[in-house]
Image: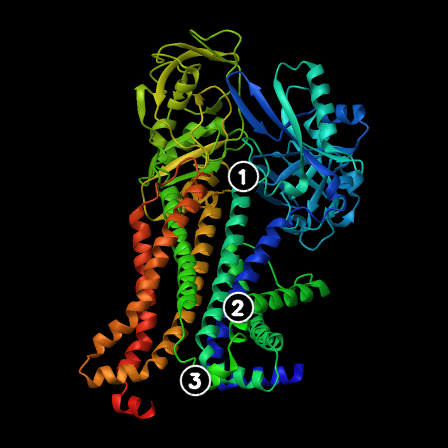
Amino acid sequence: MFKNYFKIAVRNILRHKGFSFINILGLALGLAVFLLIMLWVKDEMSYDRFHNNIDDLYRLTVAANLGEQSFRAVVTPGEMLPYLQNQIPEIEKSCRYRPLAYDILVEANGKKFYEKKLACADSSFFQLFDFEVISGNVQEALVNDDRIILTASEAKKFFGDNDPIGKEIELFNGRKTCTVFAIIKDLPANTHFDFEMLLSMKYMAPFDWGNFYFNGYVQLNENTDPRQVVQKIDRLIAAKELGIDTKYDLQPVKDIHLKSNFDIDMANSTSEINNNVYIFCYIAFLILIIACTNFMNLSTARSSKRAREVGVRKVIGAERKHLMKQFLGESILFAFLGMLVALILIELAIPYFNNLTGKEISLWKGYNISLFFQIGLLTIATGFMAGLYPSIYLSSFLPVKVIKGGLVQQKSTLRKILVVIQFALSIILICGAVVVSNQIKFTQQKDLGYEKENLVYMRTVSGYHRNYDSFRQQMLALPEIENMTLTSDIPTNTIHLWNGFDWEGMEQDKEYLMNVYTVDRNYLQTMKFEILEGRGFSPEFDDKYNFILNEAAVAYTGIENPVGKQFSHNDSQGKIVGIVKNFNYKSIRTKVEPLVMRQQGSYSYFFVRINSSNLDNVKQKISDIWQANYPDYPFELHFLDADFEKLYESETRTGKVFNYFTILAIVISCLGLFGLASFTTEQRTKEIGVRKVMGASVGQIVGLLSSDFMKWILIANFIAWPVAWILMNNWLQNFAYRININILSFFLAGLAACFIAFITVSFQTIKAANTNPVKALKYE
């Protein structure tokens, strides 16, 4: 029986090649998009899950109230973790980890580079986490602070193909010499850790309870309830009476990548990634539903072509359940053919998809028998979902009626509903793509409070101050250089908070937490900040101990008429001399936070504003001056606007992927609409011929045939708009600064869907309208 069903299915596919092609292509595109998105989701959910004891690994997090401000962070005091491990028996192992969040000059084998990925860790690090060791002893490497671990690519950069074990490497401009003690394989992309050089935590000594600089990781005993451990941690820390109201928690390491939303987090983790996972899962299922709806629509539309077959089979004894099995089998066969095409499409598309998403995913990477099982299960499920209703519908025909030709006129209510569903889903995706695109454009074009274009920066070097004045004069002598300044931070790169502020009229027994920038007197002019009150730092005044606040700091502290008021930070006592307009010095995902600027402190960056479009020429001139003044240090010039592009790279990628998948959803919908229009015009061939004989023009016939389809698309718009508004408004809540959804953009998206649908339908209706009426009536 199965063999017979298979033969009938193959013959049916070959007999109706056009519709078979549309069905297979529609399913193939739907399955290809679904699999691509699921591969991306699988990669996002795989972060840190390769560690052997991943279910028992946790990171300490803290919610703290300090004075008038509260924050959530993943930092702990240096003394905390060893103390907890001694006091809590459920903690089997623990490890402190701290990435050094600044550029470090490294020299080895006659080569010098600024390195950004240096971290410190306890010797237990490799007992908790499983990173592949190539050579050396990682356990011993982190026992002393004169030893270092390198990744394979970092070792190759400095030592080439020579064995680096035992070689010396100088850090911090020669202030520390370490011996290479171990080489590990480059960290996999799916981990929240990001280092290329690893030092012993002893380098950070001494430790105390006041320096919240360290990430803390623990491995709990098997089957330990982390909630009980958290309660013990809170009791122990409260007993220390540190003067800070804290509430600790244990975050599973496997959740760090997707479920982190902290004010201070040294890992590259954000809740936005988790939101994207949900968004693309919705898109995957929507597109697969659209593809299955296509199949249902075309299968039921062509039911009259198979009605006589059903009648004959029932007359000779076929039961309804047998017919249902046959039609379900056919749809599953279509699904398998679609899956074969989908796998080919994925192999062709995956290099472009990886480039688009910044991933290195592969369908066959690490594959096993379960992968084939999953693909087979997906195929059967898709075929079953797409073919269930057509099999029920086709097997329900009454044999006497269909054999007598009683199934000429069919009700098309279901087909209309399916078309409406298809296009409603497509329009929701179009509206979503418009909102995402507008939000990304808003992010990129938002007024930051200063001009980020034409700003470049370089890392300061040891002893730079000895000839800084000469260096600055040489730079300003270039006609392409507008101004130059010194600062401690790069906008978007501030993660440290300070307390210890006092001011005139401040309420006693309160502490305030604010960000601090160290800047020189040329900073405001170079960055082009707007001064709202007072003045900037000036050589005409003794501003060494004075301060400038942003609007957020004034609102946060509640200082009235702040200019001229006494203000101090730790040992620096002076006055507030100016108030600047708020500017975004972090990501615009968060609101502008209070900021205090001062002159006293250390500088880390030279910032230069250029006024030339010939960037390569300017870069060479700056390089020449650098080499003349700081010949022992490598020259690295960074563009601030490039940093901003990288900062919002995730949103940009999301928008592009969203757009491409939306286009594919529209293509799939149009394939179904094209097939349905072809069938409809075929069914109305005699009517078209009669109308042409009666004098109807081609335009009138096209309008008549297209009007029904357009009504369905219009109804789809009215369904899609409110759903899209609710979904996208919810998505926008993740942004501190966001657009207001413009209803006009939804209307234009709907109009675009109508236009695309009209073009798709018109291709068939124009062809039918131009057919010779005599020929049409003759064949009828």
Marks 2 and 3 sit apart, C-alpha to C-alpha, by: 23 Å
Q: Secondary structure at mark 3?
A: loop
Q: Of the residues under marks 1 and 3, which one precedes in the sequence?
A: 3
- Mark 3 neighbour class, 10 Å CA radius: few under 14, some 14 to 19, many 20 or more: few
Whether label 1 touches label 2, CB < 8 Å: no
Quadrant into which the N terminus falls: bottom right
Residue at the disc numbered 1: 633
Marks 1 and 3 sit apart, C-alpha to C-alpha, by: 90 Å
Marks 1 and 2 sit apart, C-alpha to C-alpha, by: 72 Å
Which label was assigned to residue 389? 2
Type of residue at label 3? Gly
Which circle, 1 or 2, is nearer the viewer?
2
Residue drawn at (35%, 10%) of the image: 564
The percent coordinates of residue 298 (x first, y second) are 45, 73
- Mark 2 neighbour class, 10 Å CA radius: few under 14, some 14 to 19, many 20 or more: some
Which label was assigned to residue 405? 3
Q: Of the residues under marks 1 and 2, which one precedes in the sequence?
A: 2
The percent coordinates of residue 317 (x first, y second) are 62, 84
Type of residue at label 2? Tyr
Type of residue at label 1? Tyr
Q: Nearer the viewer, residue 256 or 292?
A: 292
Q: Of the residues under marks 2 and 3, which one precedes in the sequence?
A: 2
Which circle, 1 or 3, is nearer the viewer?
3
Q: Nearer the viewer, residue 255 or 288?
A: 288
Relative horizontal placement of residue 411, taking residue 207 as reference (left or right) = left
